[in-house]
Image: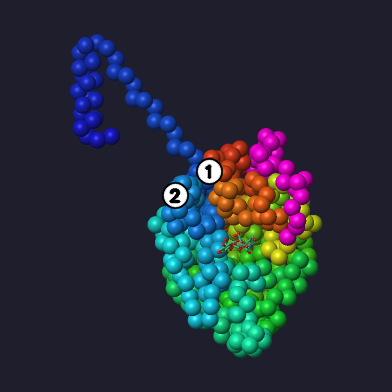
Amino acid sequence: MTAARLARRACLAALAATAGCAPRPPAPVPPAPPTLAAAYRGAFLVGAALNEGQFSGRDSAGAALVAAQFNSVTPENVLKWESVHPRPGVYDFDAADRYVAFGERHRMFVVGHALVWHGQTPRWVFQDSAGNPVSRDTLIARMRDHIHAVVGRYRGRVNGWDVVNEAVADDGTLRRSPWQAVIGDDFIALAFRFAHEADPAAQLYYNDYSLENPAKRAGAVALLQRLLAAGVPVAGVGLQDHDRLDWPTAAAEDSTIAAFAALGLRVMITELDVDVLPRAVPQTGADVGLSAAARPELDPYASGLPDSVQQALARRYAELFGVFLRHRGQVARVTFWGVTDRDSWRNNWPVRGRTNYPLLFDRAGRPKPAFDAVIAAADALRTGS
Ligand code: G3I
């Protein structure tokens, strides 16, 4: 309140006192609406994956919601190989520059996603001009050039990188990706070393889905143990957590976080969402290669989510955040894969064109009961439970 108004109020109060009538108490200032970042301050960062609309001015409501609720951002697509390096020798950093600038403008922990992945990587990367597979040395050089160009451009501005994404298969062995086929198993260590060369201060992560499944978890733990034993600069592991109402169990999530924390790695929940629709494929997780045909019974909530499911989603998120809170100090960040239900990739995977409700904000950007449940779960922080 300005000095002038204070003076005027004091004068009015003095006047009222002489006139014998009590000054009206100041109107109560409504409490600031709760935010995810504030509720979990001191425990872990809370972030969101952004699509281009949110940091390019097209979706100003989405941008405002992000700035208000989160303290970390991840690019859903614009830092992937096909976006920044579509053709040999051709880089396009336009959208990525705007993403990083948005993160800086809002004082966010800025994540880069993803440098080396089998998805959204153009075919030319693995082939020569005649379409034949390139040699090991050629692909290593292409990987090194790409990582130095991308990580180097945002040196000191991107705080952490998903260096290698989804390199472990569901049975725990290394995925037979073009990277593994052409270079060999050491493509992973090479990627981390190149990223560290390009920005020694950036945190470097291994990121994957369904690590809550025992065979895949064991394979990833063994991989990370080998990398750490070889002095490869891995700072953390990202559990994507593309979850369901009934998968993974709280116990599986608990033991998965514990297993990676025991390696001395910081653990992040990097792509959190909870699918509320009927299963369309038997697999859990997020294998982008999977798809299924649309059937009416697979899209039961196109005209709205029943309150019973809304409440089940709220209980599910409270359960998950209860686990994350029990591991505060090991879990450094929890990032949602999208901002509102409208933005979510889950509307188009594994069946295109469904109406899903996997996040905390509805299609109009309004907080859902699940949001209230996540905010309430943070009370444990203050009660020390
Ligand atoms: O950019 C083209 C656009 O030019 C074209 O008009 C449009 C037509 O469909 O497609 C656009 O490309 C889409 C791209 O997202 C950018 O929006 C692709 O079709 C679409 O397949 C792609 O989906 C992304 C998916 O990764 C691809 O693998 C999702 O948005 C993104 O959420 C998802 O994210 C992955 C993580 O990176 C890794 N973990 C799993 C997660 C979910 O699959």
341 and 150: which one is in front? 341
- The amino acid at mark 2 is Ser
Q: Quadrant of residue 349?
A: bottom right
Q: Residue at x 47, y 72 (%)?
A: 92
Q: Which residues are magenta?
A: 291-320
Secondary structure under the numbered disc 1 in the rendered image: loop
Structural crowding at the residue carrying mark 1, measured as other residues with C-alpha within 10 Å and reported as few (<14), some (14–19) or many (≥20): some
Question: x and y percent of residue 373 in the render?
Answer: 61, 39
Q: Is residue 46 visible?
A: yes
Question: x and y percent of residue 370 in the render?
Answer: 62, 41
Pointer 1 residue:
365
Pointer 2 residue:
60
The quarter of the picture where the C terminus appears is: top right
Ligand 1 is located in which of the four quadrants?
bottom right
Vertical side of 179 occupied by 136: above or below: below
Contact? badges 2 and 1 (CB < 8 Å): no
Q: Is 247 contained in the magenta span?
A: no
Q: Residue at x 22, y 34 (%)?
A: 3
